[in-house]
Amino acid sequence: MRITHLGHAAVLAETDDARILIDPGNVSDSWHFLTDLDAVLVTHQHPDHMDPEKLPTLLRANPSAAVFVEPSILDLINAGDLPSLGENASALPPDDQIAIGDVLITAVGGQHAIIHRDIPRIGNVGYVLRSEGQPTLFHPGDALDTVPGDIDILAVPAYGPWAAMKETIDFVRAVGALEGFPIHDELLSDRGRTLVVTRLNEMTNTRVVNLRGATTHEF
């Protein structure tokens, strides 16, 4: 499986039969001109995971791409509170599955991590991507409380206002992936990002590689 980190939470996963983009948000722009996408997945409604201004343009450039989102996003679109994502948009609730090419996508989780007790929680689904003969990828969105089994590659939220390093380390240990790479990292300086990667490599059994700069890595 070829993985490209396109900034913050945006990840492009490619197999021989599928090109799948996860969480194209508004703090990165490397995904803006992608073509030939088979699917776009969105974990939750925050704009750093779903850019309401640029995402419709991307979808017009990829008219055959299926769009799967956390269910409350579709509710907001239907209520007129978010721009339409086109006719191909569907909700993918937790524990539901969909096949895209040779990839089976499973939605997991259900709620965003707690930012503060005074801020209402919203929906969040992580996505597990499995393909026969390929390593399995888990992108958790903004939550550290769901630990699916048999994960080979973990997209690790490096920093958020809803997490501390001690929680991130415990999450990576619990998932137990062979390899991982940091996401959700645009609020970190280069030194901060290096610190997170170093600590995760020192304190977990997951080999964490830094894919910053739209780097593609074949796992």
Image (spheres, rainbow, N blue to C red):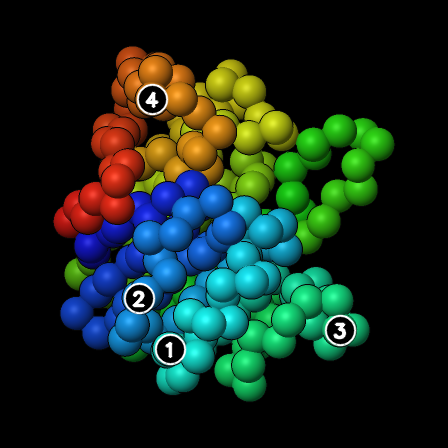
Tell me which numbered mark, 2 or 4, is placed earlier along the sequence: 2
Which of the 4 image quarters holds residue 8? top left
Residue at numbered disc 4: 190
Residue type, numbered disc 4: Asp
Q: Residue at x 21, y 44 (%)?
A: 215
Q: Which residue is drawn at 44% across and 79% down?
A: 60
Disc 1 from disc 4: Cα separation = 33 Å
Residue toward you, 169 or 68:
68
Q: Where is residue 158 in the image (x, y as percent from the top left)?
A: 44, 29
54 is higher (above) or lower (below) than 63: above
Tell me which numbered mark, 2 or 3, is placed earlier along the sequence: 2
Q: Position of residue 31 (x, y in %)?
A: 35, 58
Disc 2 from disc 3: Cα separation = 27 Å
Tell me which numbered mark, 1 or 4, is placed earlier along the sequence: 1
For the residue carrying disc 4, how many other residues have a C-alpha within 10 Å: few (<14), some (14-19), or many (20+)?
Answer: few
Left or right: residue 214 compared with residue 16? right
Q: Which residue is drawn at 34% across and 75% down?
A: 38
Q: Position of residue 23 (x, y in %)?
A: 47, 55
Disc 2 from disc 4: Cα separation = 26 Å
Tell me which numbered mark, 1 or 2, is placed earlier along the sequence: 2
Q: Are marks 1 and 2 in contact (CB under 8 Å)?
A: yes
Tell me which numbered mark, 4 or 3, is placed earlier along the sequence: 3
